[in-house]
Image (cartoon, rainbow, N blue to C red):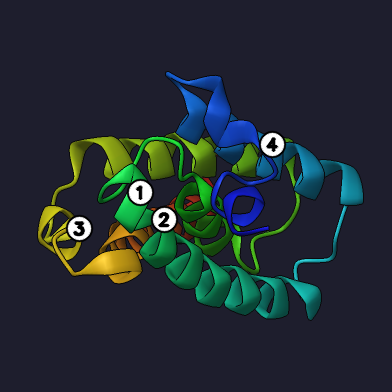
Amino acid sequence: MIKSIATAGGIGYIGKGAGTAAAVAYCTILFFLQASHTALWQPLVLAAILITGVWSAGVLEKSWGHDSNKIVIDEVAGLMITLLFIPVNLKYILTGLLLFRFFDIVKPLGIKKAERLPKGWGVMADDVLAGIYAHMLLRLIIASNIF
């Protein structure tokens, strides 16, 4: 069960690009659910993913090493933060995905430092920050009516 959580149902086992695949999987689920942007399920599921993500990443660190590429639940959490309370719209979802992956890969603005936290905290913290930055930028894009 721990491995299933950390790998987002096994997505982490695909190898290179697993983080992006996990993020795309969440985007797909969100799009097809057509959840309301005020849906209560989003923060509840996010809280559960953050808690189980920290726990599972911390447990697996002993055997897989710190922030193993197999652990992708952090990408799911980061993208959930990016899209939290954003209207479900394909252009917003794709823009959010691109912004999140940018911040997650480049790791500016303290994101790299957050990654150094011990155990599962560091695994999740960098993606949480990337999600927060992507969310703020996406909100600005939406408010400016660029689309």
Left or right of 44 in this view: 33: right
- Residue 25 tag number: 4
Say what secondary structure mark 2 lies in.
Answer: helix
Q: Residues within 10 Å of mark 2 (few under 14, many from 20)?
A: many
Quarter of the N terminus within the rendering = bottom right
Q: Earlier in the sequence, mark 3 or mark 1?
A: 1
Say what secondary structure mark 3 lies in.
Answer: loop
Say what secondary structure mark 4 lies in.
Answer: helix
| Residue bearing mark 2 | 60
Distance from disc 1 to disc 4, alpha carbons, whole Å, reads: 26 Å
Say what secondary structure mark 1 lies in.
Answer: helix
- Residue flagged by tag 1: what amino acid is it? Ser
Locate residue 97, reporting x and y percent: 52, 39
| Residue bearing mark 1 | 63
Q: Residues within 10 Å of mark 3 (few under 14, many from 20)?
A: many
- Residue 133 tag number: none
Distance from disc 3 to disc 4, alpha carbons, whole Å, reads: 23 Å
Q: Earlier in the sequence, mark 3 or mark 4?
A: 4
As drawn, the residue found furthest toward the right would be: 33
- Residue flagged by tag 2: what amino acid is it? Leu
Locate residue 83, reporting x and y percent: 59, 57
Distance from disc 2 to disc 4, alpha carbons, whole Å, reads: 22 Å
Q: Are marks 2 and 1 in contact (CB under 8 Å)?
A: yes
| Residue bearing mark 3 | 115
Residue that appears at 28% across and 58% down: 126
- Residue flagged by tag 4: what amino acid is it? Ala
Residue that appears at 57% across and 44% down: 7
Q: Earlier in the sequence, mark 2 or mark 4?
A: 4
Q: Is residue 142 positioned above or below 49 on the image?
A: above
Quarter of the C terminus within the rendering = top right
Distance from disc 3 to disc 1, alpha carbons, whole Å, reads: 18 Å
**Quarter of the image where one finds residue 92:** top right
